[in-house]
Image (tube, rainbow, N blue to C red):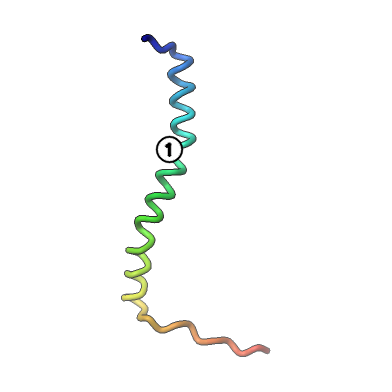
Amino acid sequence: MSVSPEEFFMYLTIALIVLVPVSARLYRRATMKRTTEMLRRQFGRAEAPERKPE
């Protein structure tokens, strides 16, 4: 089965439109826990003090 250049670029475009956002979300989700843990170790587990209403 031969794929014409138009079909090839159409499929490539569709794949990129779908794969790039999905892979970005997966990468962000994979690194979120690691980043959160690093920030907690760096700044401690103390929560931000509550602000007084003015």
- Quarter of the image with the C terminus is bottom right
Task: Find the residue positioned furthest to the front.
Answer: 1
The secondary element bearing badge 1 is classed as helix
In the image, residue 36 sits, relative to residue 30, either above or below, namely: below
In the image, residue 19 sits, relative to residue 2, either above or below, namely: below
Q: Tell me residue 16's x, y (percent).
A: 45, 33
Q: Residue at x 48, y 82 (%)?
A: 48
Q: Tell me residue 42's x, y (percent).
A: 33, 75
Quick check: 14 left or right of 36?
right
Number of other residues with Cα within 10 Å of mark 1, as a class: few under 14, some 14 to 19, many 20 or more: few
Q: Residue at x 44, y 13 (%)?
A: 5
Q: Residue at x 36, y 71 (%)?
A: 39
In the image, residue 16 sits, relative to residue 28, either above or below, namely: above
Amino acid type assigned to the residue bearing label 1 in the image: Leu
- Quarter of the image with the N terminus is top left
Quarter of the image for residue 3 reads top left
Q: Which residue is nearer to you in this view: 48 or 30?
A: 30
Quick check: 53 left or right of 8?
right
Q: Tell me residue 2's x, y (percent).
A: 38, 9
Q: Tell me residue 13's x, y (percent).
A: 47, 27
Which residue is label 1 attached to?
19
In the image, residue 42 sits, relative to residue 49, either above or below, namely: above
Report the number of discs.
1
